[in-house]
Image (tube, rainbow, N blue to C red):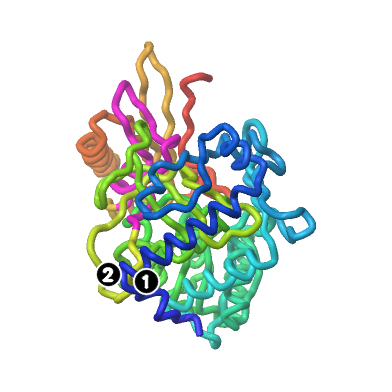
Amino acid sequence: MYWEKDIETMDRRELDSYQLNKLNETLQLAGRSPYYRSLSRREELNFKEIKSIEEIKELPFTTKKNLQDGFPYDFLAVDLKDVVRLHSSSGTTGNPTVVYHTKEDIETWENLIARCMYMTGVREDDIFQNMMGYGLFTGGIGFHYGAEKLGVLTIPIGPGNSARQIWFLRKFKTSVIHILPSYALRLYSFFNEMEINPRKDLNLKIAFIGAESHSEEIRRKIEDLYGIKAYNSYGLSEMCGPGVAFECPCQKGMHVWEDHFYMEIINPDTGKVLPEGEEGELVLTTFKRRAMPLIRYRTGDLTRIIPGTCDCGRTHRRIDRIKGRTDDMLIINGVNIFPIQIEMILMRIPEIGHNYLIEIRKENYMDRLYIKVELNEEVFIGTLFELEKLQVRITDDLKSELGVTPVVKLVEPSSLPVSEGKAKRVYDLRNN
């Protein structure tokens, strides 16, 4: 039922035509919202019928600031009585971004997640343990409804309480989990304490990981520790939540569901659309959102469109894993660095454990990069000489990748702070 062959393997020319029709429908619907209607009055947005999908480049971008400035109802394109749910970001400054859903939007979202899960091999006889947060955060609830739509027994356990998580994993023979990558690594340490081998003593076969940037090295480490397949997923609440893009069994990029979203990659500084293969900021336009359609929304997420076709036979194009966000980039004495570059290097070093922490300080008017890394138990009890050699090796590897020399500090296992939600690993202390 959820292998939609006619959609997922649609000929590219047919898919382009499909997208053009959906784009024109979206433009007409968006014109009912106060925000886009005001753009039309100022002649910044013309709602005439678009003849070619390429003409989307002529439309203005929508930004997170636009959503915040339009709080609470300026982007609503239907009557409030037709709205059945809202989700909201945790805005740290100013208004949060609020996203509305009609009943039809919720059903569309459920079907998208069911499609994603089915693609990776999830079936009705699986047991799904959802370790993501619920509430205004879309991650947990999106997968919950998608799994139930697929007919899968769903355990809405939420995050944290590792002993309880493991009890449920064992007692109910959970086969599929949805989990933060950082928590998957943290949870593994509890198995060691309880003398449980997750590769032999559990029934796990699939993990869905996402909601925070992570490297390929982290994904492979999770797969190796648990003896499972870990699939990368991508979503954002402004589109619907999880389900925008998902890995197929080939694990060579995430298929963006192009019957629901139009994607572009732009230069974040100039706004110019970039060709396939070049890295830039992901821009998305909704096709099937009723309550709150968005046109050319700048996600702030950095990735690229992977050229070529996928071996799985699906024609929907793929994006690479998210490198980071445009606002995540660290500038250290004029050098641009993304935290995921640091993670990529650290996770290649077998002596390093599962957690690390980045600090940037200002010393003598210069930026100084500090990186604390947890070691594996057997490594930490080594000789001082061995630890010093390891410290030098880690420093050299990081310097070669980053172009700056960090101060590396080796710490004992489980000594760095952890959180039940998304991992916070970067602390910019230059203004303290």
The amino acid beneath tag 1 is Cys
Label 1, residues with CA under 10 Å away: few <14, some 14-19, many ≥20 = many
Between discs 2 and 1, the one toward the N terminus: 1
Q: Give whichever of 136, 67 is nearer the camera.
A: 67
Q: Locate residue 107 relative to residue 352 in the image: left or right.
A: right
Please state the extent of the stretch shown in magenta in the rendering.
319-347
Residue 420 visible in the displayed image:
no
Q: Locate residue 429 relative to residue 407 in the image: left or right.
A: right
Residue 310 has which mark?
Answer: 2
- SS at badge 2: loop
Give me the residue at 42% from left, 44% from top. Answer: 356
Question: Residue reaching furthest bottom?
Answer: 125
In x, y percent, where is residue 177? 52, 70
Give me the residue at 57% from left, 58% from top. Answer: 240
Q: Can you identify the residue that label 1 sits on? A: 248
Please tell me whether residue 347 is drawn above or below residue 394 in the rendered image.
below
Give me the residue at 50% from left, 19% from top. Answer: 431
In the image, is residue 290 part of the stretch drawn in magenta?
Answer: no
In the image, is residue 322 part of the stretch drawn in magenta?
Answer: yes
